Image (tube, grey):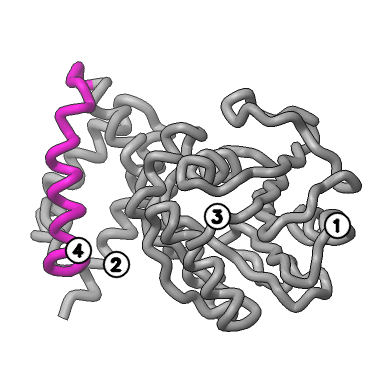
Amino acid sequence: MESLELAVVGPGRAGCALALAAMSAGHRVAAVVPGPSGVVPDVLGIEPSRYGMLPLVDLVIVATPDREIRAAAKAAAARLTGAAIVCHLSGFTSIDAADVGTGRFGSLHPLMSLPDPDRGRRALAGAPAAVTGSSRDVAAVISGFAESLGMRPFHLSDDRRGLYHTGASVASNITTGVLGLAFDLMQAAGVDPSVLRPLVEQSIANVFDIGAVEALTGPIARGDETTVAGQRLEVELLDPDLADQFDLLVDFLRHRVADRP
C-alpha cells in the first residue's frame, strides 16, 4: 500500500512497537502525543506533540489504555480531515470509542505479546491482527496497513470483541502466570526452568494439532490421584500460597478432563 502519514497517541509498549514497525515499513510517523508522563520514548526519535498542534494525517492510532480511548480520540479530532481514520489498538473496547463524527473509525488489535518496543516491533511480523472497521473501506485500509507491517489481519465482529479478547488473555496472560508457578517449583528443586521449554512448546503444539482435550496428559488426565496428592504435599511444604494456586489449577484440570467424551 502507499505510505501513510500517522499520528500515534499514547506511545506505550504497543504504540511504540507499532510506530517502529510502521517506520520500518515506509510509513511516516508525523506526530506522537505522549501519555501523562509527557515523554516520548527515545527509541522513536520524535519530539512530543500536543493535540492542538497535530499535523494533518491519514491515520490516528490511539494506543492509550482502554478507559482513555474515547477522550484521546475526541481530543485528536479537531485536526482531522474527513478522509482520516481513527483506529484504536484495544481488543476489548468497541470501535465506537474511536468515533469522532467523521464516520471513519475502527480498531487494529495485534494478537501478540508486546513486552517492549523493540521486541514487540519484531514480534509483529507474521502476527495475526484483529481488524474491525466502521465500513468495508475503513476495514480495508486498516487491513492494508497491518499487512504492510507484516501482520496477518482477520475480521473481528464488534459485538464479539469481549469473547475474543478474553480468549486471547487466557491464552497469553494466564498461560504466562501458570508457567510462573512452574518456574517457581523448578527453581525450588534446583533445576534451571529453561529445561521446561521443549516440554511447553510440544504441549502447545499438541493442543493445536490434536485439540485441547486430547492433548491433556499427566496424572490428572489418567486419574492418578495418589501422585496428585503427593505433588500437592510437596508444594504445601514449600509454600502454602503456592499450594493454593496449585489447588486452583488442579480443580480446573479436573473439570476439563471430566468434559472428555
Compared to 41, does 18 lie above or below?
Answer: below
**Mark 4 vs 2, N-terminal side:** 4
In depth, the one of 255 and 83 nearer the eye is 83
**Mark 4 vs 3, N-terminal side:** 3
Kindly indicate whether the residue at mark 1 contacts the one at mark 3 (C-beta within 8 angstroms). no
Tag of residue 208: 4
Kindly indicate whether the residue at mark 3 contacts the one at mark 4 (C-beta within 8 angstroms). no
Magenta residue span? 189-213
Q: Which residue position holds label 2?
A: 255
Kindly indicate whether the residue at mark 2 contacts the one at mark 3 (C-beta within 8 angstroms). no
Compared to 7, does 79 lie above or below?
Answer: below
Kindly indicate whether the residue at mark 2 contacts the one at mark 1 (C-beta within 8 angstroms). no
The alpha-carbon separation of the residues under discs 4 and 3 comes to 36 Å
The alpha-carbon separation of the residues under discs 3 and 1 comes to 20 Å
Compared to 168, does 123 lie above or below?
Answer: above
Q: Amino acid at mark 4?
A: Phe
Q: Nearer the viewer, mark 3 or mark 2?
A: 3
Q: Amino acid at mark 1?
A: Arg
Kindly indicate whether the residue at mark 2 contacts the one at mark 4 (C-beta within 8 angstroms). no
Query: Circle 3 — which element?
Result: loop
**Mark 1 vs 2, N-terminal side:** 1
Q: Position of residue 229 (x, y in %)?
A: 20, 44
Tag of residue 79: 1
Question: In this view of the protein, can residue 243 be seen by the observer?
Answer: yes
- State yes or no: residue 244 in magenta: no
Q: Amino acid at mark 3?
A: Ser
**Mark 1 vs 4, N-terminal side:** 1
